[in-house]
Image (cartoon, coloured by chain):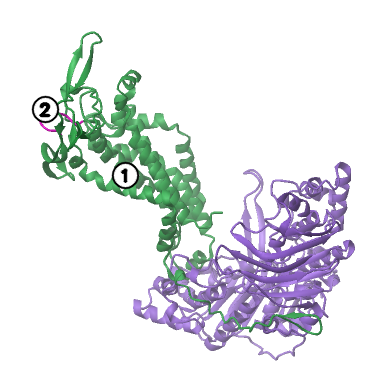
Chain colours: A green, B purple
Amino acid sequence: MSTLPDGRYVDDRPYERDLGEEARNADLDVSNTRLVWRRFREHKLGLVSALFLLFSYLMLPFAGFISPYTANERAPDHLYGAPQGIHLFHEGSLIGPYVYPITAEVNLETFSWEYIRDYDNPAKLEFFCEASYYKLAGFIKTNRHLFCAPEGATVFLLGADRLGRDVFSRILYGAQLSLTVGLVGITVSFFIGIILGSIAGYFGGFLDWIINRVIEILRSLPELPLWLALSAAVPSHWSPVAVFFIISIILGILDWPGLARAVRSKFLSLREEEFVRAAEMMGAKPSRVIGKHLLPNFLSHLIASATLSIPAMILGETALSFLGLGLRAPAVSWGVMLNDAQNLASIEIYPWTAIPMLPIVIIVLAFNFFGDGLRDALDPNRS
Amino acid sequence: MKVEGLTIGFGNAAPVVEDVGFSVEPGETLALVGESGSGKTLSCRAALRILPEVAQVHSGSVVFDGSNGPVDLMGLSERAMCDIRGNRISMIFQEPMRSLSPLHRIGNQVIEVLRLHGTAKGQGAYKRVIETFERVGFADPERIYQSYPFELSGGMRQRAMIAMAVVGKPDLLIADEPTTALDVTTQAQVLGLIKEIQQDNGMAMILVTHDLGVVANLADTVTVMNRGRVMEAGPAPLVLGDPQHGYTKDLFAAAPKIPDSGEEVSREDKPDYILEMRNVSKTYTLKGKAAWHPKIHVQAVRGIEFGVERGRTLAVVGESGSGKTTCARMALGAERADPGAEILFRAKPDADTVNLQDLDTSARLAFQRQAQMVFQDPYSTLNPRMRVKDALCEPMDIHKLGTRPERVDRAAEMLRWVGLSPNMLTRYPHAFSGGQRQRLSIARALMLGPTFLVCDEPTSALDVSVQEQVLQLLEEIRDRLNLSYMFISHDLAVVARIADEVAVMREGLVVEQGPTEVLFHNPQHPYTKALLAAQPEPDINRPINLKIVAQGAGSPSTWPEAYRFDGTSVPPLTEMGLGHKVRCYA
């Protein structure tokens, strides 16, 4: 620091001219995807949810292997069987995982089934055992299960339902439909939403007007009755898989307006960006401008918003099936299972029939946390 | 107010403001000068304790010696701070468009200051607000009191902001780039107003700015900052007249100046135009208030007649809304002019002339190879998701020229031309500074080997030193490739440097056009005179002459008889000298 005789101050640190060569920083060369991943990693809840969802989806093909029973396998002697715990120690000594066998007796005073545990004869679980046949990943026919009950005993981890089917196995099988319905639906909704939204946003004018009115009309229709009407139109003799696809497409068709609006508004603002103008002045065609300049700039936001709307699809399927208008037996989904829990009295006496709500809650929460994390990672400028 | 040893940092990173000190005496103006990122705004905000949450003050003291004796602002409680902010110290922000709440009437927003601090109540407060409005130059204060911000222009809003800042009669006013977002004539008037009010109220002022011209007009003492440090500080005449520090010297060297005089150059009789606009008008049709109301026609551009000579630069100058950007878009065929217009383009002296008004698709593609544009905003001109390589190759990709390796080779060559290194090809735009991005934008425009470039305010978003470099680059390339430029700008100093011909626009009309030397040396039209007079010069001996500014910057119906125009009756462009035309009645 130095002060000149005329009273002014001049910094005496040697001065280097800034030649426009900035300090190179490896961070600056990283592609956007890696930056997003770095920020996403810091969102712990989102990360855990993402891992959980990844695990859930990876598990789907092996649902048959993990579950001890197949989806529609009945144990007529164990209607509304209570959940059975797995124990390790019997009378103070370790004998490995086992269950207590259960026998059913009719109580003639209350006219209900009573299940009596046989505490004397622990039945050890078998591993990699052979039981009923199922198709692994949809095409390999096998009867090998991760674990199953020994001869003469049952293993109902989460109890049995009205027809004596294992709730745990059915939840795993139900996940196959309930988790994928969201993906199919969102694909349909993405496809329609992006195409119509980008047309409306990029070209504007009359097309924009038409698309906006269609969106408004669709949005003004009451959702539930519309679902009901559309699903009622599905012929009842169709196979469960066909019904499943129709249902997910219906969900997608009703979901696109929100997405189309998001796409449109984003296009309207991006269209004013100078790099879009520059591309137009270079002579780029609209398809190129949309595909190369506009979409890549907010595709990641769309993915985040799609992640956030998958839960709505899952809930939609559940609601439809719960009302008996979505998937129908013998297809298994969480909604179909909850259909059995419509009766208040049965929930009161056999609370485990409502257990399929748990995976729904967990999956929906996981999707929400994941979507939140993704959105935060994509938008570093949030306040 | 005295700030000492102020150090501010974000998180654990190296401090962005380091050991900064400045002080301002009552009735005095201190100017904090520096380029963007030099920490000048941060220092001021720290003094008011309105830093963003992530920034922390590591050390330093801010002592404010107001009418109630000295207090250390750093040690004050949040509650006591509220009494000081707005009341004893007030601030004017940069963006007049964003600093007023759009939901409340101007008057209510201003009177709020008095209510919050209990300075005045009821009728007294109202009277004081109206007086302040009169003071800041509103002709009809009562109407302004009832207006919403959207009803006012940028300059009016900034006046309203000033009214809000001074209504509580503060001891200190912090003005953070108060005129950066305004047109140059409005800027001159607002600066004059600030100065006047300051003298009346005897308050101290800290002026944050990057514009040395503004400093020369207002400041008593100057503190020059760079990269978070004070480079030089002292009385304005000393620092501005005889800078000692290297950085200050560089800053002055880079500031563009309007030349004092110039000799007239002789011109050929028949200019060789690369682009000629004849009788070009553009009318936009807006929807009426309702379907049954008549449609509103807005004439953005009226009867333009000028041409860009081969190898030379035509500058179009005007305030925002004068139609200069529409003009540029029409010159590139991106916008079609009204019927009857002719926009003639000739790529080479011996080539055929094409009329941009009636191009078919293939002719348009051919034209686009010859004419390209450089945009204003370096941050939005490059697609953030495209690597530099892809962005540069895109023009050739669109026009299906060359193979991939050839395109990349050309991109590398263009990077060298604009002074960047070819190993930047794989980087993303976010790795570049504003000046570098503008270079990339120029490189992209050059990829197709054009003969004509339209530059839409390419330097207005850049710091002065970078602006200087970009202008130099543009000149180099022009001479090297024999390019012709149409240069859109609002900054006369930049224009004076690069242009051969200048056309001054106002409300869609060219009011004066001619060779640069003539126009700057011998301006005829009152609006041109006002523009020249309003340009702040970094010379303390040449203050802005507000009288000339006021005369020319008003609405065209207030101009002297010979130049006056309104609605329909417009004076013709009259030739005053060789190529020098002025819109007036002879």
Of labels 2 and 1, the one closer to you: 2
Of the pair B521 and A317, the residue shown nearer to us: A317
Task: Identify the amino acid type marked 1.
Answer: Val
Of the pair B294 and A374, the residue shown nearer to us: A374
Question: Which residue corresponds to mark 1?
Answer: A184
Of the pair B578 and B146, the residue shown nearer to us: B146
Q: Is residue A320 above or below residue A9?
A: above
Judge from the rendering whether residue B263 lies leftward or rightward of residue A331; answer left or right.
right
Task: Identify the amino acid type marked 2.
Answer: Gly
SS assignment for the magenta stretch, majority: loop
Segment colored magenta: A149-155
Of the pair A17 and A108, the residue shown nearer to us: A108
> Does any portion of residue B535 appear in the rendered image?
no
Q: Does B564 lie within the magenta span? A: no
C-alpha span from label 2 to label 1: 42 Å
Q: Is residue B202 above or below residue A180?
A: below
Chain bearing tag 2 is A
Q: Quarter of the image holding residue B210?
A: bottom right
Q: Is residue B355 above or below residue A291?
A: below
Q: Secondary structure at mark 1?
A: helix
How far from the left and from the top, in percent, is residue A330?
A: 21, 30
Lower position in the chain sequence, tag 2 or tag 1? 2
Quadrant showing the N terminus of chain B: bottom right
Mark 2 crowd level (few <14, some 14–19, many ≥20, 10 Å Cα): few
How far from the left and from the top, in percent, is residue B389?
A: 42, 74
